[in-house]
């Protein structure tokens, strides 16, 4: 999501005649698009902003702008400006599309501009984008979130759900396909609730419309919410040939008590049922997930429930992380907060279980030929790379540049989560 918003900021700057600088010292403008989902992301951003003080002293014309969900937090912009008065522009998530006018205001007045809106702005369809992830194109379908999971800051900094019109999304998909993009990833905090506010469409209908677009391309989407992930969607996934056979379905915890405290609105049994249904319609579907340990009040028994769920479901991949206290969320006031040492022990155990699942899943690829979409070149490994329809990354040697092409690769070696092979 943040990456795509950075593409919008770059697109707006490009439309004003700016070009990408090779280094910070050559830049006329530096924009930080920040994230506040976890505390360490916030600390890192502040460290990076502080490090620019020297550069600003040597280059008085340099413009430093800071936006994103960190600055959208209540009272944060003022606090940030007090700490770093050399910042030229501070904006929030709700007025990101208006960045160009803030920039001209700053240039005209020659003084800092702090403009963070309390309310969501209208959806703007005219914001230019400078896409940076060819052959994949990120496309937002819904902004904001209505769910208020108790650990999450997103609804406070991104506002309520607002869906783009189906017609606008389909037109954008057609445009990127005609430009040569081979994969589309639809984005939203909860893509499954797409269209609820429109009343004229829903996520399954949108997928069917996009699937009708001619040409060979892959369709992915993220993120899903288990409570809204329904049979109609699963059926649609099984019927639309362009939709990849992978789905990211964040479970967060395997304990019913913790899921309730998290305000997730599903139980572990519901989650098992959705996974069974998915595997009934699409037997080889690759399911990935997010799992948190150390949520306030998590006992050893709760953690063992999570471990049990992970062992039984056998995820194709999992993002595991330790709960990060975000002030302003209900969970920040919950007691007892889990001892960080216990959280560390738990995450190590979790990673070790998931690692062995990853390895055996990778092993099942040995000797197989898979079609991958070549998406880049890894300078360290000196190999091209790309993913198959299940989202598995494969590396291979090749003398010609195949980025953006579908390539058959025969897998000869497997490791943790990545695969190694030869082009056929
Ligand atoms: S659904 Fe996702 S974005 Fe929304 S509150 Fe829950 S975790 Fe945050």
Image: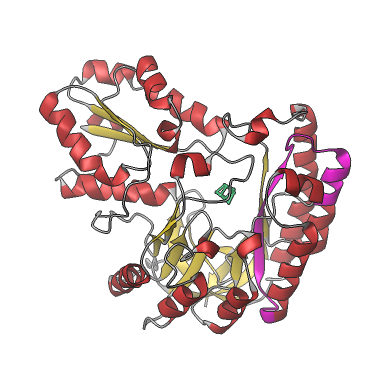
Q: Quadrant of residue 82?
A: top left
**Residue 401 appears in the picture as rendered:** yes
Up/down of 65 relative to 198, above or below: above
| Near-viewer residue (266 or 22) | 266
Up/down of 55 relative to 212, above or below: above
For this view, does 17 lie left or right of residue 126?
left
**Spot occupied by residue 178 in the image (x, y as percentages of width and height):** 28, 74
| Near-viewer residue (245 or 368) | 245
Residue 83 lies in the magenta-colored region:
no
| Near-viewer residue (31 or 353) | 31
**Spot occupied by residue 181 in the image (x, y as percentages of width and height):** 35, 69
**Residue 27 appears in the picture as rendered:** no
Up/down of 136 relative to 2, above or below: below
| Image point (64%, 41%), residue name | 150
For this view, does 315 lie left or right of residue 60?
right
| Image point (67%, 51%), residue name | 264
Figure label count: 0
Identify the colour scheme used.
secondary structure
Q: Which range is magenta?
A: 281-306
Q: Quadrant of residue 19?
A: top left
**Spot occupied by residue 187 in the image (x, y as percentages of width and height):** 46, 59
Residue 289 lies in the magenta-colored region:
yes
| Near-viewer residue (51 or 176) | 176
For this view, does 377 lie left or right of residue 233?
left
| Image point (85%, 54%), residue name | 308
**Spot occupied by residue 175 in the image (x, y as percentages of width and height):** 28, 71
For this view, does 154 lie left or right of residue 304?
left
Question: Which residue ends up furthest to the right in the rendered image?
Answer: 301
Question: Which residue ends up furthest to the left in the rendered image?
Answer: 108
């Amino acid at each position: 999501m943040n990456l795509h918003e950075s593409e919008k900021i770059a697109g707006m700057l490009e439309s004003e005649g700016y070009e990408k600088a090779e280094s910070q010292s050559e830049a006329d403008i530096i924009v930080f698009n920040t994230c506040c989902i976890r505390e360490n992301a916030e600390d890192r951003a502040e460290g990076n902003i502080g490090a620019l003080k020297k550069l600003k002293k040597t280059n008085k014309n340099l413009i430093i702008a800071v936006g994103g969900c960190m600055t959208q937090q209540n009272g944060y912009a003022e606090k940030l400006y007090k700490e770093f008065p050399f910042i030229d522009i501070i904006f929030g998530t709700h007025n990101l599309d208006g960045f160009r006018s803030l920039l001209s205001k700053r240039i005209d007045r020659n003084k800092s501009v702090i403009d963070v809106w309390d309310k969501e702005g209208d959806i703007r369809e005219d914001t230019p984008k400078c896409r940076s992830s060819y052959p994949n194109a990120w496309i937002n379908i819904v902004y904001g979130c209505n769910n208020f999971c108790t650990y999450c800051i997103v609804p406070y900094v991104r506002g309520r759900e607002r869906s783009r019109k189906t017609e606008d999304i389909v037109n954008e998909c057609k445009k990127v396909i005609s430009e040569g993009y081979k994969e589309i990833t639809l984005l939203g905090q909860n893509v499954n609730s797409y269209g609820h506010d429109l009343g004229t469409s829903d996520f399954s209908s949108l997928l069917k419309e996009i699937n009708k677009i001619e040409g060979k391309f892959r369709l992915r989407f993220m993120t899903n919410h288990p409570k809204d992930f329904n049979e109609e969607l699963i059926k649609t996934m099984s019927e639309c040939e362009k939709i990849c056979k992978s789905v990211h379905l964040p479970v967060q915890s395997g304990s019913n008590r913790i899921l309730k405290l998290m305000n997730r609105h599903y139980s572990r049994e519901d989650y098992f049922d959705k996974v069974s249904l998915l595997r009934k319609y699409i037997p080889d579907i690759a399911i990935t997930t997010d799992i948190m340990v150390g949520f306030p009040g998590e006992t050893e028994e709760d953690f063992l429930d999570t471990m049990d769920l992970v062992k039984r479901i056998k995820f194709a991949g999992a993002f595991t992380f330790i709960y990060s206290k975000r002030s302003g969320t209900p969970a920040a006031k919950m007691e007892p907060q889990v001892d960080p040492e216990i959280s560390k022990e738990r995450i190590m155990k979790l990673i070790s279980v998931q690692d062995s699942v990853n390895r055996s899943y990778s092993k099942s690829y040995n000797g197989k030929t898979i079609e991958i979409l070549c998406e880049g070149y890894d300078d360290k490994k000196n190999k091209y790379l790309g993913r198959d329809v299940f989202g598995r990354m494969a590396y291979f040697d090749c003398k010609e540049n195949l980025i953006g092409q579908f390539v058959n690769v025969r897998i000869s070696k497997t490791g943790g989560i990545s695969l190694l092979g030869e082009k056929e």
